[in-house]
Image: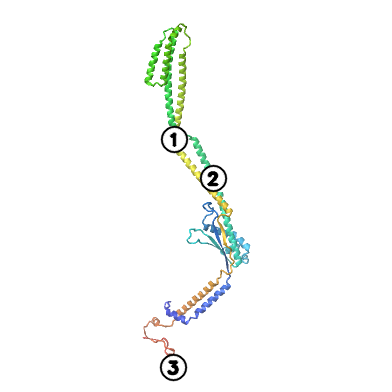
């Protein structure tokens, strides 16, 4: 007796000994049903092929590929494109698929059925390798005709290889076209920055940051030239004043000689010149131009004094109306001094103007440097961007050329589409094993139901549980021989009779 749905091992053994024949019957029946299902169910055949991904013939370090390196997203994108209605409907028409269902179903339904029969499985990379890229994928096509399954599998595989080649070239051309447009835009911006930089250099020529040291050096040189010009003007003015003094003396002597007055004696002139020489020597050295000139005049006067006897002989002659040559020479020297002073003043003014220009450049140098750095930074940024785009466009063009020459990443069919000789559904071992297992489970379920439905008492615990009375004595099972003798005496005991206290 089973209590509360719990079966003991003794109950299971008792039921199994009594109804053991149920298990073989259920197993045989379910196995037979499985065989019938194998015969009745429509058969499906699976054709498959393996496609490997060959790396580019040229290393990616030399020519960077345009397509992304990860095959997973690209394979998913290609799968969606190939398994679309646009691509599968021609396949249905090409191989005349589902001829009996075309009248009852729409084209979309047939496309969905064909899409469900196609399976693309990526291959996992080998364990322990550093390369985590997908080495390839498997295309499986399940159909009710093995020949059609093989043909469809070959067609789908060809579509994958063609789509890979087309997508590589298309991506390369699109990338090249996009980069070309961006390059033209970057070139126009670079030209604009170049024009701004050239205009700035032309506007602030001489005030640029790299010319600051040159301006300082020129300013130092100009200050030296200005000082020299100032000293030269001072000396010229002194020469002019000295010559004016001499000319005044000469004119006074000449006018006195013309008016009949006693001219200044030569000795007095010599004394006057010597006094002037002493005064100049107190200020300048013997190499000073004024000192040298005055010495020359003194020497000329001394020579004149040496020739005085001849002059006395000529004293009786009438005086000349023209100015003496010495006076004329002094007038010429004064004129030359005026010209020299005017030229020196002009040079001084020009030097001062240059100094003002250089000082303005030096003072404006910090502001110009700030603006120049900003323009240079913008120009360098535009130049770097242009060079980067130019490099990327050349790489994209090279990658496109590789794809066109089929030297890039390619899909290679390792195994052609197989022709299945055994159906993939239903599989005989699976159905037979499932039928036998189902028969065994069914038989065990029936045995469990029989054990639960059995209400007879077999043990003392069953008696105590059912009657809720303690057991006083139990009569053991008797041997067949003993039972036969007791039956002859008319006292055959009831098997398993148990006495209880009433």
Q: Single out the mark in the foreground, 1 or 3.
A: 1
Choose the circle earlier in sequence order: 1 or 2: 2
Q: Earlier in the sequence, mark 2 or mark 3?
A: 2
Estimate the x, y position of residue 271 in percent, counting from the top left: 38, 13
What kind of element bears circle 3? helix
Residue contact between numbered discs 1 and 2, judged by CB atoms under 8 Å? no
Q: Quadrant of the N terminus?
A: bottom left
Judge the density around disc 1: few (<14), some (14-19), many (≥20) Cα neighbours within 10 Å: few
Name the spot of residue 285 as percent of width and height, x first.
Answer: 39, 21
Query: Which element type, helix, strand or loop, lies under badge 1?
Result: helix
Query: Which marked residue is nearer to the observer: mark 2 or mark 3?
Result: 2
Near mark 3 (Cα within 10 A), the count class, few <14, some 14-19 or many ≥20, is few
430 shown above or below 168: below
Residue 286 badge:
none
497 to the left or right of 139:
left
Comparing 270 with 185, the one in front is: 270
Say the numbered circle drawn on residue 213. 1
* Quadrant placement of the C terminus: bottom left
**Mark found first going from the N terminus, 1 or 3:** 1
Label 2 vs label 3: CA separation? 123 Å
According to the image, label 3 marks what residue?
488
Find disc 2 in the rendering and name its residue: 185
**Mark toward the viewer: 1 or 2:** 1
Residue 220 vs residue 375, the one in the foreground? 220
Residue 45: % across, % down: 58, 68
Q: Is residue 361 above or below residue 102?
A: above
Q: Which image quadrant is residue 84 in?
A: bottom right
As measured in the structure, the alpha-carbon distance from the residue carrying label 1 to the one carrying label 2 is 38 Å
- In the structure shown, which secondary structural element does the residue marked by tag 2 occupy? helix
Crowding around mark 2 (Cα neighbors within 10 Å: few <14, some 14 to 19, many 20+) is: few
């Amino acid at each position: 007796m089973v209590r509360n749905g719990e079966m003991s091992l003794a109950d299971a053994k008792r039921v199994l000994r009594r109804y053991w024949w149920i298990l073989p019957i259920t197993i045989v029946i379910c196995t037979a049903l499985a065989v019938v299902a194998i015969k009745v169910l429509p058969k499906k055949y699976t054709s498959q092929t393996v496609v490997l991904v060959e790396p580019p013939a040229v290393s990616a370090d030399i020519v960077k590929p345009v397509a992304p390196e990860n095959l997973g997203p690209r394979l998913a994108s290609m799968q969606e494109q190939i398994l679309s209605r646009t691509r599968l409907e021609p396949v249905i028409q090409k191989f005349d698929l589902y001829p009996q269902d075309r009248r009852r179903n729409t084209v979309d339904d047939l496309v969905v059925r064909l899409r469900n029969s196609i399976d693309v499985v990526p291959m996992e990379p080998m364990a322990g390798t550093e390369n985590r890229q997908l080495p390839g994928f498997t295309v499986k096509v399940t159909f009710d005709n093995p020949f059609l399954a093989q043909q469809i599998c070959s067609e789908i595989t060809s579509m994958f290889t063609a789509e890979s080649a087309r997508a590589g070239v298309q991506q390369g051309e699109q990338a090249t076209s996009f980069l070309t447009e961006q390059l033209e835009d970057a070139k126009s911006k670079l030209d604009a920055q170049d024009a701004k930089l050239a205009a700035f250099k032309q506007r602030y020529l001489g005030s640029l940051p790299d010319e600051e040291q040159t301006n300082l050096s020129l300013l130092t040189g100009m200050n030296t030239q200005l000082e020299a010009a100032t000293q030269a003007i001072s000396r010229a003015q002194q020469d002019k004043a000295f010559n004016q003094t001499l000319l005044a003396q000469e004119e006074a002597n000449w006018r006195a000689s013309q008016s009949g007055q006693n001219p200044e004696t030569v000795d007095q002139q010599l004394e006057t010149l010597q006094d002037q020489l002493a005064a100049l020597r107190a200020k300048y050295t013997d190499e000073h131009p004024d000192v040298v000139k005055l010495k020359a005049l003194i020497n000329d006067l001394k020579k004149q004094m040496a020739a005085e006897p001849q002059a006395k002989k000529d004293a009786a002659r009438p005086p000349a109306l023209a100015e003496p040559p010495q006076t004329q020479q002094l007038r010429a020297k004064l004129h030359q001094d005026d010209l020299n002073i005017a030229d020196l003043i002009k040079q001084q003014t020009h030097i001062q103007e240059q100094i003002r220009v250089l000082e303005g450049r030096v003072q404006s140098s910090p502001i110009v440097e700030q603006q120049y750095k900003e323009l240079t930074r913008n120009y360098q940024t535009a130049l770097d961007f242009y060079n980067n785009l130019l490099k990327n466009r050349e790489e994209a063009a090279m990658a496109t050329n590789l794809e066109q020459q089929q030297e890039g990443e390619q899909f290679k069919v390792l195994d052609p589409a197989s022709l299945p000789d055994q159906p993939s559904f239903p599989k005989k071992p699976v159905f037979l094993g499932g039928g036998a297992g189902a028969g065994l489970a069914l038989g065990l379920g029936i045995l469990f139901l029989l054990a639960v439905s059995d209400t007879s008492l077999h043990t003392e615990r069953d008696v105590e549980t059912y009657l809720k009375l303690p057991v006083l004595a139990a009569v053991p099972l008797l041997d067949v021989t003993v039972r036969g003798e007791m039956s002859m005496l008319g006292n055959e005991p009831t098997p398993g009779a148990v006495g209880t206290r009433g």
